């Protein structure tokens, strides 16, 4: 008697395509943060709102994009490897489109703030899902995969900033909000149907990771009860705070140093050249240091990057009055800051395992929101234009995190490995 055949297993997904889909989604939401500045002045002129009132919308976007990522991650992990990524990214794409459509029709600050909140929630869901997918699909190349994904968000606006600016000039900011919102949301919705996390056949024939990783996954509750998580959180806050200070104040610093409008390259001012270099370096750092950390270890890579960062802050304070040195030192600061968005999620997944990696990475990512509260202190320290004090403090902060990485984090991870099973490291990758 013939027995019925068991249902065929789903064929393994190509993880490099999954990574590419995640990078694409991140690129499509990048200008929500990095292209926003292009809309501020047109909105101010159209409605008579002050710049400070408009920027409250930006603050709302950052807060919700950052602080709600654990919720999005919990939904992704809870719904499973197939439904979770698709549903959260699809909803995120719809909310991103809706948020920009609301912005297009906003005739009051209240409506503008609602648009920012809606788009922030959507972008946070997409960010959490794509980073979580990267750490799950690439245990052997986790730093590189997360770095490439984060680079999509860090440098993706470079693709859309020029057409957005041209459309604002030709058709106005409202039409630009509307059509770019619809286009971005539609593409994200289409890509969402192709996303999934690894399961079953996807985990077969995978090479052991180079970096030692937990074989048992910790739940979010266990992660929040772990001292090593809070050490990572403090380290993230300290490095992120110094980097956000540079991001928020770079134009003010250039003007204070008297180099902002100095002609430097092909007629471009020092500030213009610095901003271009900074964005390129910020995006490049994420996959570069992630790739390095896959080979020499997370703590060693942190020590190298943050030492260079500390030196760069000090050099900017000491030599930044020269236009070329300002560009070089500012570029190095961004190069040694952007990598936190690949190193810390990778380290978190190494320590706490892949099963709940999306929500656990989201919990750690809230440190970015916490660090934003440190930025105003830079203005207090720089009272009277004394930015050298700010750079000295940020340099010492980076050096302190180097010490934490080598002499606190590394021993704590070693002790945790003794207490819990780990996957053996290997020189082989796929």
Image: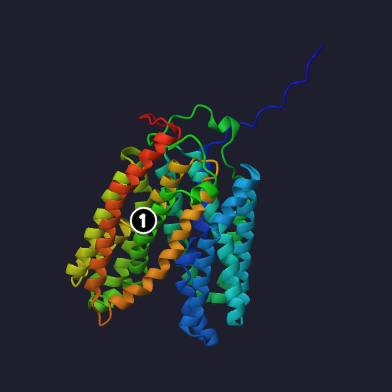
How has the structure been colored for display? rainbow
Q: Identify residue for label 1.
A: 235
Residue 236 percent across, percent down from the top left: 39, 57
Image point (40%, 44%), residue name = 143
Q: From this view, report whether residue 50 is shown above or below residue 359.
A: below
Q: Residues within 10 Å of mark 1 (few under 14, many from 20)?
A: many
Q: Is residue 331 left or right of residue 371?
A: left
Q: Residue at x 72, y 23 (%)?
A: 6
Residue 274 percent coordinates (x, y) = 30, 67
Q: Is residue 90 above or below residue 292?
A: below
Question: Can you say which quadrant of the picture contains the C terminus?
Answer: top left
Question: Residue furthest toward the bottom?
Answer: 48
Is residue 250 visible from the viewing direction of this image?
yes
Res. 169 visible in picture: no
Q: Is 3 left, or right, of 9 in this rendering?
A: right
Q: Residue at 52% x, 41% y: name it.
A: 17
Q: Position of residue 49 (x, y in %)?
A: 52, 85
């Amino acid at each position: 008697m013939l027995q019925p055949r068991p249902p065929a297993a789903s064929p393994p997904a190509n993880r490099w395509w999954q990574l590419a889909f995640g990078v694409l989604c991140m690129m499509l939401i990048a200008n929500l943060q990095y292209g926003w500045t292009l809309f501020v002045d047109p909105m101010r002129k159209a409605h008579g709102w002050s710049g400070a009132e408009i920027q409250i919308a930006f603050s709302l976007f950052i807060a919700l994009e950052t602080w709600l990522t654990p919720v999005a991650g919990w939904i992704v992990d809870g719904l499973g490897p197939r439904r979770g990524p698709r549903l959260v990214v699809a909803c995120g794409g719809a909310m991103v489109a809706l948020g920009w459509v609301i912005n297009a029709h906003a005739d009051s600050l209240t409506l503008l703030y609602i648009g920012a909140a809606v788009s922030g929630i959507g972008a946070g869901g997409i960010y959490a899902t794509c980073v979580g997918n990267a750490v799950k699909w690439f245990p052997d190349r986790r730093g590189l995969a997360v770095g490439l994904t984060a680079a999509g968000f860090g440098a993706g606006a470079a693709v859309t900033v020029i057409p957005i600016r041209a459309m604002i000039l030709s058709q106005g900011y409202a039409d630009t909000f509307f059509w770019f919102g619809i286009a971005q949301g539609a593409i994200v919705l289409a890509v969402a149907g192709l996303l999934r996390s690894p399961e079953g056949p996807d985990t077969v024939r995978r090479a052991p990771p180079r970096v030692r990783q937990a074989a048992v996954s910790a739940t979010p509750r266990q992660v929040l009860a772990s001292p090593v998580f809070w050490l990572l959180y403090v380290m993230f806050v300290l490095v992120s705070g110094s980097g956000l200070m540079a991001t928020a104040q770079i134009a003010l610093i250039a003007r204070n140093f008297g180099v902002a409008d100095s002609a430097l390259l092909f007629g471009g001012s020092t500030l213009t050249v610095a901003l271009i270099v900074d964005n390129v370096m910020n995006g490049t750092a994420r996959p570069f240091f992630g790739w390095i950390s896959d080979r020499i270890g997370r703590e060693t890579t942190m020590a190298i990057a943050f030492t260079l960062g500390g030196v760069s802050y000090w050099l900017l304070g000491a030599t930044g009055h020269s236009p070329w040195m300002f560009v070089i030192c500012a570029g190095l600061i961004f190069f040694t800051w952007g990598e936190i968005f690949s190193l810390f999620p990778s380290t978190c997944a190494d320590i706490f395992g892949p099963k709940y990696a999306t929500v656990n990475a989201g919990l750690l990512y809230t440190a970015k929101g916490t660090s934003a509260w440190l930025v105003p202190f830079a203005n207090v320290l720089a009272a009277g234009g004394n930015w050298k004090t700010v750079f000295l403090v940020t340099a010492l902060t980076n050096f302190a995190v180097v010490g934490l990485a080598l002499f606190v984090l590394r021993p704590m991870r070693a002790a945790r490995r003794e207490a819990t099973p780990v996957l053996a490291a290997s020189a082989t990758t796929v």
